[in-house]
Amino acid sequence: MNYWRVTKFNPNFRERGPDSPYTIDTWIQVEDLQYKKMSVEEYLKIEDLYVRACFEFVKESKIKELDVVDFINDMSISNLLVRNNLFIKDDRKKLKKILVEELEDIVKKNLRGIVYCKLEVKGEFFIHFGYDFYMYIGSKYPCDKAILSVSDSGLFVEDFVSPYL
């Protein structure tokens, strides 16, 4: 299995290595809109890069549907998301599988803190969402094209095992 961490954070700005703190003061979650650390437009641009990254890795890994693991949908409704037209309603209490066509919706909801879940194909592929806009991807394929495409988009792809395994 191959493992990566996909982030908006340039690894050159970590103090001492991949597990150390990031040294640049930047936004780390959608809720940072309230502190005016970024604009809604900037947030949406980065969020779109994460969504596209997921599609790149899913495509190269030949995935058609994903198991939804540890689905939580009891997050409180954020007034900040509502005010900025970023809230996406989701009344589901259970979710077991999604088709690739549903990936964009569930990725956005994870990044915005509307729901939480892990997306997996047992022994073949996963997408895990961590705190502070860290996303972890694993695949039985090396995904060289996805890595190049995602890196070219402005996100950073590092070899890194998901802490959520």
Image: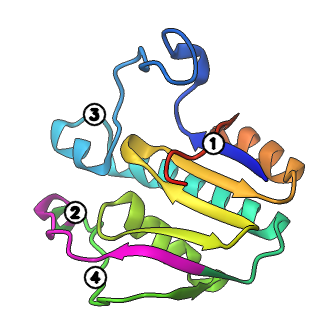
Discs 1/2, front: 1
> How many residues crowd around disc 3 within 10 Å: few (fewer than 14), some, or many (20 or more)?
some
Q: Nearer the viewer, residue 73 or 54?
A: 73
Residue 37: which numbered mark, if any? 3
The crowd level at tag 4 (other Cα within 10 Å; few <14, some 14-19, many 20+) is: few
Q: Image height check: is 23 above or below 153? A: above
Q: Residue at x 23, y 61 (%)?
A: 84
Q: First in sequence: mark 4 or mark 2?
A: 2
Q: Residues within 10 Å of mark 2 (few under 14, many from 20)?
A: some
Q: Is residue 78 left or right of residue 47?
A: left
| Residue 80 pos. (x, y %) | 16, 58
Q: Is residue 51 shown to the viewer in this render? A: no
Give the magenta range: 67-81
Badge 2 is on which residue? 81
Instruction: Give the answer, above or below, for where 4 lies relative to 86.
Output: above
Q: How many marks?
A: 4
Residue, disc 1: 161
The amino acid type found where label 3 is placed reads Lys
Q: Which residue is mark 4?
A: 89
* Mark 3, secondary structure of its residue: loop
User: Residue 28 at x, y = what percent?
Assistant: 35, 38
Mark earlier in primary sequence (1, 2): 2
Point 75% across, 40% down: residue: 152
At label 1, the amino acid type is Val
Mark found first going from the N terminus, 1 or 4: 4
Judged left or right of residue 34, residue 71 is: right
The earlier-in-sequence mark between 1 and 3 is: 3
Q: Would residue 74 be counted in the magenta stretch? A: yes
Give the mark nearer the N terminus: 3 vs 4. 3
- SS label for mark 2: helix
CA–CA distance in space, label 3 to label 4: 25 Å
